[in-house]
Image (cartoon, helix red, strand yellow):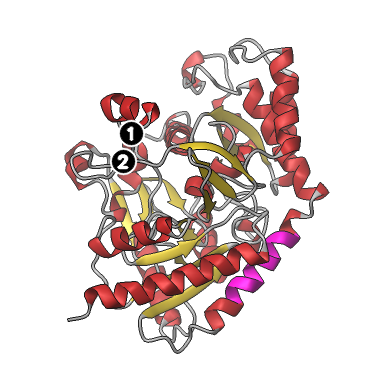
């Protein structure tokens, strides 16, 4: 056993891991483009972008340069009472590429904390106006927004957090009309969801603080996708009632769905948006909660009690800001959205060939994301089926981690056509092995 594994086994506590059962983790020693490499030099294609973070590819030379340049200037300065060029320029750049008056950027350090900021912000928005009844949030069934307590509360419909139910604030989860290729029932499902929403808004939503939505894609909930038109109708209804809408684009932001932000496909503007993961192309822990000017203005006044009293030690870390700025520049320099369109087209061709398969159902694609469900597979995040396939894919040099019965790809944008074909081949072989393993 390597020294790294010895130390890891003795001291490290890994996320979403039952250490009494889990096999030893793979020691990664380097990475480049779409590939990870272990201690023995074995290549593993990172086909889920290391939990959806890696955008332009691992160890991108231009992002490396930006990181080193900033490190040679200074690594960090507290953001209360101070500012610096990377944070100011990144704030301005985000405001420029986001629509409408989404101009006020609050920095934190991961997706969950970005959600916490949005929830606190929307609650205090009402309290600053003397509204004390608004103690409830709306969300969607199956939604996941992170693992901190506020994020768990609005994500309790995901099924991950039942242990903590009695500690959470009040959230109403509405039905989510997920859809796929050939879904003949989508209109009826959307009508049911909109009727449920209308019931919640019938009295003007007088006790509702905000609604939080993963636009177009529920990621951890199983890559469940909805139509842009449905997203638009929900957002317009909620905003018409005067209730802020929060978009959780932690997973969908920065090209994942084929546009820079998923909101572009629905043609609507939320009141608050949360971004992380690919913001720094996976390099540095950082997130932002961006609010409309109209929201920000309700926090101004002569009383500190009106201010958002929230912060993090590493708020607006200059290294992360510099990396994020360079990542945004690369979208133009490397024509990244065109790369994503090419990946999407290749995904669609692969799904075309699976239409008549008898072991997969609910085929779907959105931007760089491909997903389908296994027919008659066991349920649960760590089901035996998902673990079997994960291990098989790793043996084939593929980092693909099924979400229960859902197999999906979300590759870095630099992934080549040949690399995707390797992934497709591995998936098909894995499904064949699964059939053999489960047959009588």
Q: Is residue 331 above or below residue 383?
A: above
Q: Residue at x 59, y 65 (%)?
A: 420
Q: Residue at x 57, y 19 (%)?
A: 301
Q: Is residue 134 visible?
A: no
- Main SS of the magenta part reads helix
Residue 51, percent from left and from top: 47, 47
Q: Whole-percent x and y of residue 346? A: 63, 72
What residue sits right under mark 1 in the picture?
Answer: 1
Which range of residues does the magenta coloring cover? 338-348
User: Which of these two is toward me, 407 or 20?
Assistant: 20
- Disc 2 marks which residue? 24
Which is more toward the observer, 300 or 311? 311
Q: Residue 438's quadrant in the figure? A: bottom left
Q: Secondary structure at mark 2?
A: loop
Which of the marked residues, 2 or 1, is nearer the chain's N terminus? 1
Determine contact: label 2, label 1, CB under 8 Å: yes
Q: Position of residue 424 (x, y in %)?
A: 52, 70
Decide: few, some or many residues near mark 1? Use Cα within 10 Å; few <14, some 14-19, many ≥20: few
Q: Is residue 369 above or below residue 132?
A: below
- Residue 132 in magenta? no
Instruction: Tell me: 402 left or right of 105.
Output: left
Quadrant of residue 400 within the rendered picture: bottom left
* Gap between marks 2 and 1 measured at Cα: 10 Å
Q: Residue at x 37, y 31 (%)?
A: 2
């Amino acid at each position: 056993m390597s020294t790294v594994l010895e130390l890891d086994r003795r001291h490290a506590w890994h996320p979403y891991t039952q250490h009494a059962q889990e096999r030893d983790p793979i020691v990664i020693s380097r990475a480049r483009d779409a590939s990870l490499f272990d201690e023995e030099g074995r290549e593993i294609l990172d086909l889920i972008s290391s939990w959806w973070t890696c955008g332009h590819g691992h160890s991108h030379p231009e992002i490396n340069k930006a990181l080193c340049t900033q490190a040679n200037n200074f690594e960090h300065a507290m953001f209360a009472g101070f500012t610096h060029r990377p944070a100011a320029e990144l704030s301005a750049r985000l405001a420029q590429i986001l629509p409408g008056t989404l101009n006020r950027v609050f920095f934190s350090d991961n997706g969950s904390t970005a959600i916490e900021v949005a929830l606190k912000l929307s609650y205090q928005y009402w309290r600053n106006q003397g509204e004390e009844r608004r103690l409830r949030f709306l969300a969607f069934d199956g939604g996941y927004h992170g693992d901190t307590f506020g994020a768990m509360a609005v994500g309790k419909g995901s099924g991950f957090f039942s242990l903590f139910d009695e500690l959470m604030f009040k959230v109403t989860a509405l039905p989510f009309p997920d859809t796929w290729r050939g879904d003949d029932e989508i209109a009826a499902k959307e009508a049911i969801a909109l009727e449920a929403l209308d019931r919640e808004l019938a009295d003007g939503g007088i006790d509702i603080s905000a609604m939080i939505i993963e636009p177009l894609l529920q990621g951890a909930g199983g890559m469940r996708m909805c139509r842009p038109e449905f997203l638009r109708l929900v957002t317009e209804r909620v905003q018409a009632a005067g209730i802020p809408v929060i978009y959780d684009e932690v997973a969908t932001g920065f090209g994942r769905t084929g546009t820079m932000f998923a909101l572009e496909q629905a043609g609507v503007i939320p009141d608050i948006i949360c971004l992380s993961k690919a913001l720094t192309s996976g390099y540095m822990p950082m997130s932002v909660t961006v609010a409309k000017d109209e929201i920000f203005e309700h926090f101004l006044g002569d009383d500190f009690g009106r201010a958002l009293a929230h912060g993090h030690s590493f708020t607006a870390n200059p290294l992360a800001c510099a990396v994020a700025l360079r990542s945004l520049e690369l979208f133009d320099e490397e024509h990244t959205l065109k790369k994503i369109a090419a990946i999407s087209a290749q995904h669609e061709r692969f799904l075309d060939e699976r239409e008549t398969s008898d072991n997969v159902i609910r085929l779907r694609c959105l931007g760089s994301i491909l997903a389908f469900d296994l027919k008659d597979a066991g349920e649960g995040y760590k089901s035996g089926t998902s673990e079997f396939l994960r291990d098989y894919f790793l043996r084939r040099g593929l980092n693909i981690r099924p979400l229960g019965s859902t197999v999906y790809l979300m590759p870095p944008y630099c992934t080549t056509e040949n690399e995707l074909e390797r992934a497709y081949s591995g998936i098909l072989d894995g499904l064949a092995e699964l059939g053999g393993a489960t047959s009588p």
